[in-house]
Amino acid sequence: MDDGLGNLSLFTRRVLIAVGLVALVAILLYFAGQLIDVLLLVFAGILVAVSIDGVSQLVARYLPLSRFWTLSLAFVLILLLSVVLGFVIGPPMKEQLPQLIQQLPEALQELAVTLLELPGIEAALKEVEEPGQLINPLLEQFTALFTSTFGAIASFFLILLIGFYLVLSPSMYLGNMLLLFPPARRGRWREVLAIQGRALRLWLLSRLISMLFVGISISIGLYFMDVPMAGALGLIAGLLTFIPYLGPILGMIPTVLIAFLTSPELALYAIILYFIVETLESNVVMPIAAKGVVRLPPAYTVIVQLAGAAVAGLAGVILATPLAVVAVVAIQMLYIEDVLGDKVDVLGK
């Protein structure tokens, strides 16, 4: 009788523990969903810290200095580079970007009107009383998207602040995080976090190379094609290249719209230019200039980006790929190697 009650009590405790764990996970997921924007902001700060730490490690490779001095030199180099870029591209961007923002809605409306004049389009849209009923909502959505893209600059300084504090004392934050795991597993988790940091640095290097090549190539190509605001369009193309695969497509849209205001033929030439630049970037520049950098398979990357868009909108698209890099390293080391016992080429290792 006592054994039966003991077994029942043990079963009850296990059920309560399982229910409690499920409830805890549900609560954590709920709060994670509510704080998704904050969590993405923190991860963006981690990317900034990883970038600064990468520059610091590069300095340490050539100069036998302490962590304090390599980090200080890294800050100075980044600041000098920012100032130089500001003096070089600042004045033309100050003139071209406002003009670009003003002309993009006009270009989109012009393209929509032209498409409505194509044979068969009018018949297909005969239930629409006025073209404006189709054009105006599309125009409003495009303008809102473009505005929100540049509105993200409002979070820029907060991201820098988070990255600055993280890179100043990474061991403190890393040590506090490791306290969440059992002592016997902390060494393995420390190794995983180190490889994740290395994989992120290599991924950021690949993005930097792509951004520079695409931005400069597009600017030069558009300039010789006499496309207005070539510098601003090239800057947008370069910045959006940070988002693999989807970014170049998004970067091409403003260029095609502005070129279309001049002539449809110029818009076609702009599309060809983008195709040539992206082909060279993928098949020539990256294999030569960035051996060993981290690149995820295209289909996997696009799926992750679409999932990020569904969960967190534009910020989810931007940060989906580096988040996927972190997840892949964790799965490879903690599941495939530790649980399954298989050997795998860990990303970034």
Image (cartoon, rainbow, N blue to C red):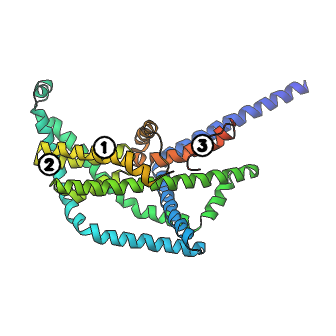
The reply to whether the C-beta atoms of the residues labelled 1 and 3 are less than 8 Å apart is: no
72 relative position to 151: left or right: right
Seen from the viewer's position, the closer of residues 113 and 29 is: 113
Q: List the single residue furthest toward the right.
A: 2
Q: Which residue is mark 2?
A: 106
Q: Residue at x 49, y 57 (%)?
A: 47
> Is residue 105 among the parts visible in the rendering?
no
Q: Which mark is residue 313?
A: none
Seen from the viewer's position, the closer of residues 206 and 114 is: 206
The percent coordinates of residue 50 (x first, y second) are 52, 60
How many marks the image carries: the answer is 3
Q: Disc 1 to disc 3, how far (Cα)?
A: 31 Å
Q: Residue at x 29, y 58 (%)?
A: 216
**Amino acid type of the residue that numbered disc 1 sits on in the rendered structure:** Ile
Q: Which residue is mark 3?
A: 345
Q: Which mark is residue 249?
A: 1
The reply to whether the C-beta atoms of the residues labelled 3 and 2 are less than 8 Å apart is: no
- For disc 3, the neighbor class at 10 Å (few under 14, some 14 to 19, many from 20) is few
Asked which secondary structure carries label 3, the reply is loop
The percent coordinates of residue 176 (x first, y second) are 65, 59
N-terminal of the pair, mark 3 or mark 2, is 2
- For disc 1, the neighbor class at 10 Å (few under 14, some 14 to 19, many from 20) is some
Asked which secondary structure carries label 2, the reply is helix
**Amino acid type of the residue that numbered disc 2 sits on in the rendered structure:** Glu
**Against 192, is 297 above or below?**
above
The percent coordinates of residue 211 (x first, y second) are 36, 55
Number of the front mark, 3 or 2: 3
